[in-house]
Image (cartoon, rainbow, N blue to C red):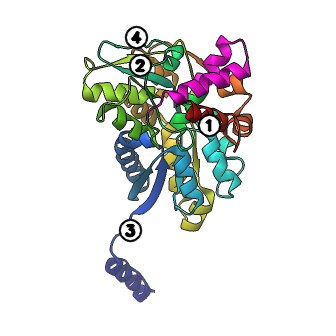
Amino acid sequence: MIRRAWALLLAVLVAGPAAAVEIINASYDVSRELFDALNPAFAAQWKAKTGEEVVIRQSHGGSAKQARAVADGLPVDVVTFNQVTDVDFLRKAGLIAADWQKRLPNGASPYYSLPMFLVRAGNPKKIRDWSDLVRPGVQVVFPNPKTSGNGRYTYLAAYAYALEQSKGDQAQAADFAAKLFANVPVFDTGGRGATTTFIEREIGDVLVTFECEVTAIRKEYGKSQLEAVTPSVSLRADFPVAVVDKVVDRKKSRKVATAYLEYLFSVPGQEMLAKYHYRVLDGAVAKAHAAEFPSVRLTTVEQVFGGWDKVAQVHFAAGGILDTALLKANSAR
């Protein structure tokens, strides 16, 4: 018995400390700085709780593009996307369980944002609302809705505005979307690429992107150089998260992957999200940061479009309203 105990101890000493657990998070394009800060905070909490080292690696890109990469074999443990349709794409591919939205609070969306406008100093084109984005001579920069959740939210927010202005006329709303697309000088694949086009390449009169990105850009480049414009109405962008069941079951990483997503709903996680300019669910955290977020009337995909399933069928399917508007815009250039 004593020999066996010594043998086990020797084996442990020879093997050394256990290797760190590694998980990979596939996320949308403009979340880099957020997770650069959040991942070490979670790792420290996990180490204190379990004694186990965890390393979180990141993959970033346009949300829809990321979903396709995961479906094609990118072995990520979790996804933190910005659109339900991208997670549901992986559900349909057999990688994520059908009940993914029931596993975590708020339909598995721990935070949200909305499309806003960023203009240059003095707002030379006097851009105030969505209607200004379709005026002749106004160049609008936002990512491609075919590859980016950020771009899809911009398209849907503009369409929702047009529907409201036209009292529900779908033809007028589709025409509005086509005029908007015709004013886009270049379509980047993701939100960060669109930011680079607007800021560094100095293309465009207005950048449409998530509020969190607008605030971060102004902090980095100077509030005197860039102005934020809040439209009269925008679309709530809930950011869904999910464990990639097929991967975590193979890697035996479900426990830490689940805890990682749960951390986003915790008070420390919500504080970190608010610090990086996202709107959060926790009432106390939201109240503490309320002064940082302008008041804006928000509508939802459910209210305007009847839910994400209907959006996917009517707008995003091949030959749908989005494709038709893009084709009409191209022919008008």
- Between the residue at mark 2 and the residue at mark 1, the CA separation in whole angstroms equals 46 Å
Tell me, yes or no, if residue 288 can be seen here. Answer: yes
Dots 1, 4 in contact, CB < 8 A: no
Instruction: Residue under label 4, please give it.
Output: 126
Q: Identify the residue at image location x=46%, y=86%.
A: 1
Closer to the chain start, of discs 3 and 2, is: 3
Instruction: Residue under label 1, please give it.
Output: 327
Q: Nearer the viewer, residue 251 or 2?
A: 251
Dots 3, 1 in contact, CB < 8 A: no
Q: Identify the residue at image location x=52%, y=41%.
A: 148
Q: Nearer the viewer, mark 3 or mark 1?
A: 1
Q: Identify the residue at image location x=66%, y=27%.
A: 301
Q: Position of residue 256 (x, y in %)?
A: 50, 55
> Looking at the image, is 185 positioned above or below residue 103?
above
Closer to the chain start, of discs 3 and 1, is: 3
Instruction: Tell me the kind of residue under disc 4.
Output: Lys
Secondary structure at badge 1 equals helix
Q: Quadrant of residue 156?
A: top right
Instruction: Tell me the kind of residue under disc 1.
Output: Leu
Q: From the image, give the main secondary structure of the stretch colored magenta.
A: helix
Instruction: Residue under label 3, please give it.
Output: 19
Secondary structure at badge 4 equals loop
Tell me, yes or no, if residue 281 can be seen here. Answer: no
Q: Quadrant of residue 13?
A: bottom left
* Residue situated furthest bottom in the rendering: 3
Q: Within 10 Å of the Cα at label 3, are there few (<14), some (14-19), or many (20+) other Cα atoms? A: few
Instruction: Tell me the kind of residue under disc 3.
Output: Ala
Instruction: Residue under label 2, please give it.
Output: 288
